[in-house]
């Protein structure tokens, strides 16, 4: 007989941090807050533990995971940092930046974590709860966003519990995350750094530190390197209609900077990402507002045009994927991440 145990949710105090570290060291699955989104953590050096992440998320195996460490020193034991990687780490760690670098000799990250690649994705999160758990665990922790594959990323512990009511050892509740978008991923493998995924660190900030423009690797015709490169992703149940200049009957509206296109008054629900037009605030609200509008029961979420600058670039990237055509639910998993 099998029994199902409801996933435990504990407030992020010292006891919860200690229990999280103990469960992680024992090969368990623990969701915890980072400054970007909640992560679904497992010991990155333990292939069996990492396999449980893929199983819980329903994520295709070819997609490598980010390994989280407490500081840049630890990161540099795991990966080889060229000049650009060193600059970016110094400028933005701890923070919402992931660096993909060649594996160091003697790198202890399990092959399953990197999906067999000879590169490794490393991130030093700034969230104090993530920091405390990483230090207590004393090893790199693999952690994709704590949502089922292809679904909206979680910015609260309640979002995590909704996706994983019984599959995890523990959820550590540290409140709503501040950044709200996943980390920006930059590959520092070849001479020229390239953005693999737009995210919570604006591209302009990276270019300022590197003193040069940085390209975004495009998905078309290439093997997926980051989950955001797959077509459908971050998908709510409702359809998403971008660039809406009017609201159709029965739609919910996601707006920005106070925009109220014709039909707004009749919308099923309306949420403004940032009435004062602030991109940082908009990013922090983005995933939870998508969830709330999805829960309104509307068939379609109309979204006003979002300016393509600062974090608007990453928000538009997520919106394009949320709006992308979806394969039928009965066939292959619709996406990853
Ligand atoms: O903000 C974040 O980055 C969150 C929090 C929890 O830290 N994590 C996150 O992880 O978004 P995830 O697994 O959903 O997205 C990480 C992506 C992988 O799916 C993969 O495509 C890319 O990073 N990645 C990992 N290792 C890579 C590698 N060696 N080369 C290229 N891309 C890699
Ligand atoms: Mg994800």
Image: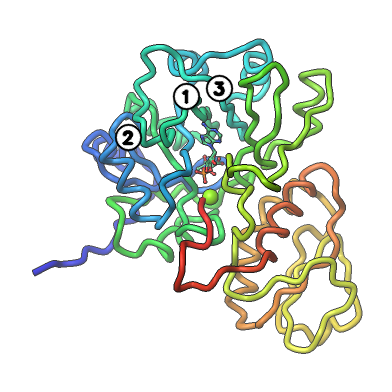
Please indicate whether residue 77 sits to the left or right of residue 26 in the image.
Answer: right
Please tell me which residue is depicted at 87% across the width and 65% down the height of the picture.
258
Question: Mark 1 near ligand 1 (CB under 8 Å)?
Answer: no
**Residue 151 % position (x, y):** 53, 61
Please tell me which residue is depicted at 62% across the width and 59% down the height of the picture.
287
Q: Which mark is residue 101?
A: 3
Q: Is residue 26 above or below residue 69?
A: below
CA neighbours of label 2 inside 10 A, class few (<14), some (14 to 19), many (20+): many
Q: Is residue 10 above or below residue 289?
A: above
- Location of residue 271 (image quadrant): bottom right
* Mark closer to the observer (1, 3): 1
Question: Mark 3 near ligand 1 (CB under 8 Å)?
Answer: no
Identify residue for label 1: 118
Mark positioned earlier in the residue sequence (2 or 1): 2
CA neighbours of label 1 inside 10 A, class few (<14), some (14 to 19), many (20+): few
Give the distance between the C-alpha atoms of the residues marked 1 and 3, in whole angstroms.
9 Å
The number of numbered badges drawn on the structure is 3
Secondary element at image label 2: strand
Q: Nearer the viewer, residue 58 or 62?
A: 62
Please indicate whether residue 309 sits to the left or right of residue 254 in the image.
Answer: right
Q: Is residue 81 above or below residue 32?
A: above
Secondary element at image label 1: loop
Give the distance between the C-alpha atoms of the residues marked 2 and 3, in whole angstroms.
20 Å
Identify residue for label 2: 43
Please tell me which residue is depicted at 75% across the width and 68% down the height of the picture.
254
Q: Which mark is residue 52?
A: none
Q: Nearer the viewer, residue 128 or 313?
A: 313
What colour-coding does the image apply?
rainbow
Secondary element at image label 3: strand
Mark positioned earlier in the residue sequence (2 or 3): 2
Question: Mark 2 near ligand 1 (CB under 8 Å)?
Answer: no
């Amino acid at each position: 007989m099998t029994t199902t145990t409801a996933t435990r949710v504990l407030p992020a105090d010292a006891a919860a941090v200690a229990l999280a570290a103990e469960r992680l060291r024992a090969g368990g699955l623990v969701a915890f807050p980072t400054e970007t989104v909640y992560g679904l953590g497992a010991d990155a050096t333990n292939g069996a533990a990492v396999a449980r992440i893929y199983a819980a998320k329903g994520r295709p195996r070819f997609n490598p995971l980010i390994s989280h460490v407490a500081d840049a020193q630890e990161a540099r034991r795991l990966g080889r940092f060229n000049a650009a990687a060193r600059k970016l780490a110094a400028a933005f760690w701890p923070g919402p930046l992931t660096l993909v670098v060649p594996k160091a000799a003697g790198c202890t990250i399990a092959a399953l974590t990197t999906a067999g690649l000879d590169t490794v994705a490393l991130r030093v999160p700034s969230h104090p709860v993530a920091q405390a758990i990483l230090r207590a665990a004393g090893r790199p922790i693999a952690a994709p966003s704590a949502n089922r594959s292809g679904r909206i990323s979680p910015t609260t512990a309640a979002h995590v519990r909704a996706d994983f009511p019984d599959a995890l050892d523990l959820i550590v509740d540290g409140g709503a995350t501040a950044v709200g978008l996943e980390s920006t991923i930059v590959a520092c493998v070849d001479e020229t750094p390239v953005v693999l995924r737009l995210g919570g660190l604006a591209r302009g900030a990276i270019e300022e530190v590197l003193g040069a423009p940085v390209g975004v690797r495009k998905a078309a015709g290439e093997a997926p390197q980051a989950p955001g490169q797959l077509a459908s992703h971050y998908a709510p149940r409702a359809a998403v209609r971008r660039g809406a200049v009017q609201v159709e009957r029965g739609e919910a509206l996601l707006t920005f900077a106070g925009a109220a296109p014709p039909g707004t008054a009749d919308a099923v629900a309306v949420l403004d990402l940032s009435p004062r037009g602030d991109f940082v605030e908009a990013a922090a609200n983005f995933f939870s507002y998508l969830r709330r509008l999805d829960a309104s029961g509307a068939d379609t979420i109309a979204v006003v045009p979002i300016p393509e600058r600062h974090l608007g670039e990453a928000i538009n990237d997520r919106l394009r994927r949320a709006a992308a055509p979806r394969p039928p639910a009965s066939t292959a998993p619709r996406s990853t991440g």
